[in-house]
Image (cartoon, rainbow, N blue to C red):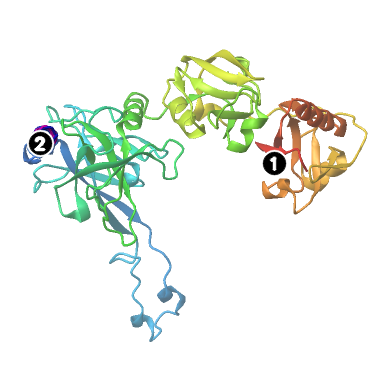
Amino acid sequence: MKSKAIAIRQDQGQLRRLFTVGFAILTLAVAFALAQVSAAHAQQRPATFADLAEMVSPSVVNITTSTVIAGRTGPRDLLPEGSPFEDFFNDLDRGPDGGAQRSSALGSGFVISADGYIVTNNHVIEDADEILIEFFPGGGEGVPAQLIGTDPNTDIAVLKVDLENLPFVQFGDSNAVGARVGDWVMAMGNPLGQGFSVSAGIVSARNRSLQGTYDDYIQTDAAINRGNSGGPLFNMDGEVVGVNTAILSPNGGSIGIGFAMSSAVVQNVVDQLIEFGETRRGWLGVRIQDVTPDMIDAIDGLDMARGALVTDVPAGPAEDAGMLAGDVIVNFDSVAIEDTRELVRIVGNSPVGKEVPVTVLRGGELEELTVVLGRRETSEAVAFPASQEPEIAPEDAEILGLMLSPVTPELTDQFGLNVAEGLVITAINPASEAASKGLLEGDVITEAGQQPVAAISDLESRIQEAKDGGRKSLLMLVRRGGDPRFVALPLDE
């Protein structure tokens, strides 16, 4: 019995030794694999930016602009001639001769063709009377530049110098490898008027929006300061993936939050400015708003807050294609649409006259439409046709926390309405959900459940239909002045 116990202990000891050896081998294998991964990542990190900077520097330029500022009336002009107080006033707004003076500004840019086309920011050359280009490495006289075209919407401008065989750089794909979050990028320009300068960092974020309709900014921690505006943001292949445009800073200097307009936007704008001297953006011809989470239950077939909800369809491409108010645009030109900002950017980057497949959600079903795009610059101010005034007997009612009345001449005069039919909000319960959604007296409900309403009975029918269908909210189209928007109100009030 004793010998059997000894044998068992010996077997256990062998197992422990085998386990210890196996664990050690596994640990070494894991360590080796991690070392290989670390080595791979280390190889991806550039040891130096010197070769890249040397390659692209000849294409980067400094830009100096000057503007004549008219002299303004100063305190001295208010004094009678010969006054003893004249000498105490120094009118800094005027030149030595008491008239206009010249103001100068600095910026950056980059050459995109051998025959002298240069890209910069619109705000760098805006209102300039004279534009001079200084080429790398600097120190020479500035070369006069001609303004080809500008686009304030994206803050892009194109210049031209009368030179040949210039070194130039090309645009890269800002949506591809090399401009992902975490990828290395290099900025070049003329920060604070110090001359040609290089800074490096990574892409911190993508698809940033500041204030513009077509914003698609790359955020980077590469140092960008005043004077860098209009300069290029390079990927590691020496391609321009962005145009340095703005910084977020409490003190005017770089704190590692800079923004470059993506090449996906810039390249299309530049091509149009060179060809036409102006932009020619695609125009769909609809008014839209984002789909919010509280609308999901109120829209048949919608499983999540996505797409662009059509609020109005004036005469134009969308109307010709059969699009209707209440449609949710979920796909445009084979691209899934997440929100209105994405749709506006894609449509604007599409060529005028292009036939585009558009998928809309309507009544719980997907509808396929084909739209021939118009031109935004000449069509977006299309007026909405006035409707004939309907003859509807006045009828008031309180529904969903709203006091409602059909449109009448008296209410039209009182609230300055520009619609001929619908239900006017004449009072609101301040404790209602309608009040929390921002509805106001004078707003007009023109649709409910994606169907027109002109009388109280119409709205009551839509509410009953929604309840019968098991819905908890009702989608309403509300007009305020010329601006329509959809609002989803709960049906339990």
User: In the visual, does 42 lie left or right of 429?
Assistant: left
Instruction: Check the image and name the residue furthest to the front.
Output: 1
Q: Which residue is mark 2?
A: 6
Of 365 and 100, the residue lying toward us? 365
Q: Which residue is mark 1?
A: 481
- Is the magenta region chiefly helix, strand or loop? helix
Which label belongs to residue 87?
A: none
- Residue 247's spot in the image, x, y percent? 32, 51
Quadrant hosting residue 410: top right
- Residue 29's spot in the image, x, y percent? 10, 32
Nearest-to-viewer mark from 2 and 1: 2
Above or below residue 385? Residue 59 is below
At label 2, the amino acid type is Ile
The C terminus, quarter of image = top right
Of 94 and 109, the residue lying toward us? 109
Above or below residue 428? Residue 421 is above
Picture residue at 13% right of the left edge, 30% below the top: 166
Instruction: Check the image and name the residue furthest to the right.
Output: 393
Give me the C-alpha separation between circle 2 and circle 1.
Answer: 96 Å
Of 401 and 55, the residue lying toward us? 401
User: In the visual, does 183 lie left or right of 7?
Assistant: right
Sort mark 2 into few (<14), some (14-19) or many (20+) by Cα contacts within 10 Å.
Answer: few
The N terminus, quarter of image = top left
Of 455 and 372, the residue lying toward us? 455
Quadrant hosting residue 242: top left
- Residue range highlighted in magenta: 5-15
- Residue 219's spot in the image, x, y percent? 31, 43
Picture residue at 20% right of the left edge, 31% below the top: 239
- In terms of secondary structure, where does tag 1 sit? loop
